[in-house]
Image (cartoon, helix red, strand yellow):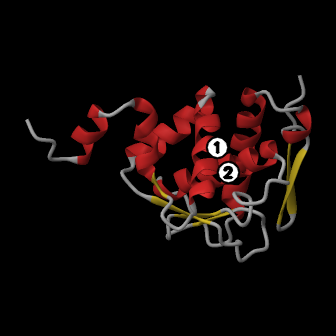
């Protein structure tokens, strides 16, 4: 029988390839695509990361990945409503700490999950604590050094949110 829907297609391919349907990497060069795919492999290598990517896949939306620099000056960013992750030069610059890149990407992909789930705010402030907690949880599950997940402080207009995952 011919495959006629995206769902049927997803069911017929290898589980690893399933996740890449979520991402449009056409704006990246081949080495950037390779690095991005490697980052996704690292994210899905731990349960919390795999759960996030599976959840994003279930929305049947495409996230475009660019090497644009986010307008807010951050090193990475998710453009809510545009379904776009801006990676800056993190995919082309070999000097970036891979753990920092993974932590940031997991954080930004969690923003995509929030966006697809209808969780939004005009300032973005109410979304940040959850994204930081997710990123820190991912970092810990991935086995990163505590510096990546401990004592994360995110200022929110007047109230700092502090998350500490000490053992």
- Residue 132 appears at what percent x and percent y? 75, 48
Q: How would you rate the neighbour count of disc 1 (Cα within 10 Å): few for under 14, some for 14-19, many for 20 or more?
A: some
Q: Height in image: 55 above or below 159?
A: above
Of circles 1 and 2, which is in front?
Answer: 1
Mark 2 burial class by Cα count in 10 Å: few <14, some 14-19, many 20+: many
Q: Identify residue for label 1.
A: 39
Pointer 1 and pointer 2: residues touching (CB < 8 Å)?
yes
Left or right, 118 with reference to 59:
right
Closer-to-camera residue (19/79) = 19
Give me the C-alpha separation between circle 1 and circle 2. 8 Å
Q: Secondary structure at mark 2?
A: helix
Question: Could you tell me which residue is drawn at 72 percent across and 45 percent down?
Answer: 102
The secondary element bearing badge 1 is classed as: helix
Residue 13: x and y in percent read 32, 34
Q: Is residue 127 above or below residue 67?
A: above
Question: Residue 114: horizontal and vertical position, in percent?
Answer: 55, 53
The structure residue drawn at horizontal position 59% and vertical position 36%, both measured from the top left corner, is 41
Q: Quadrant of the C terminus?
A: top right
**Is residue 35 shown left or right of residue 83?**
right
Residue shown at 55% from the left, 40% from the top: 52
Question: Would residue 136 be found to the left or right of residue 58 on screen?
Answer: right
The answer, for residue 110, to whether it is visible in the render is no
Q: Nearer the viewer, residue 34 or 56?
A: 34
User: Residue at (10%, 41%) from the top-left corner?
Assistant: 2
Residue 8, located in which quarter of the rendered image?
Answer: top left
Residue 137 falls in image quadrant: top right
Determine whether 78 is above or below 161 in the image.
Answer: below
Q: Residue furthest top?
A: 167
Answer with mark 1 or mark 2, whichever residue precedes in sequence. Answer: 1
Q: Name the residue beneath numbered marker 2.
A: 105
On the image, the x and y values in percent for residue 58 come to 39, 43
Label of residue 158 in the image: none
């Amino acid at each position: 029988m011919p495959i006629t829907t995206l769902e049927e297609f997803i069911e017929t391919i290898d589980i690893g390839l399933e996740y890449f349907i979520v991402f449009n990497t056409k704006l990246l060069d081949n080495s950037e695509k390779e690095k991005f795919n490697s980052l996704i492999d690292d994210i899905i290598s731990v349960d919390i990361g795999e759960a996030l990517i599976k959840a994003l896949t279930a929305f049947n939306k495409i996230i475009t990945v660019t090497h644009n620099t986010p307008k807010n000056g951050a090193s990475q960013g998710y453009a809510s409503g545009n379904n776009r992750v801006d990676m800056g030069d993190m995919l082309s610059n070999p000097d970036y700490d891979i753990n920092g890149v993974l932590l940031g990407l997991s954080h930004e992909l969690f923003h995509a999950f929030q966006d697809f789930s209808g969780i939004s705010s005009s300032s973005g402030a109410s979304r940040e604590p959850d994204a930081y907690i997710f990123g820190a949880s991912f970092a810990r599950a991935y086995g990163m050094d505590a510096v990546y997940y401990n004592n994360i402080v995110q200022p929110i207009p007047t109230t700092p949110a502090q998350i500490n995952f000490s053992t």
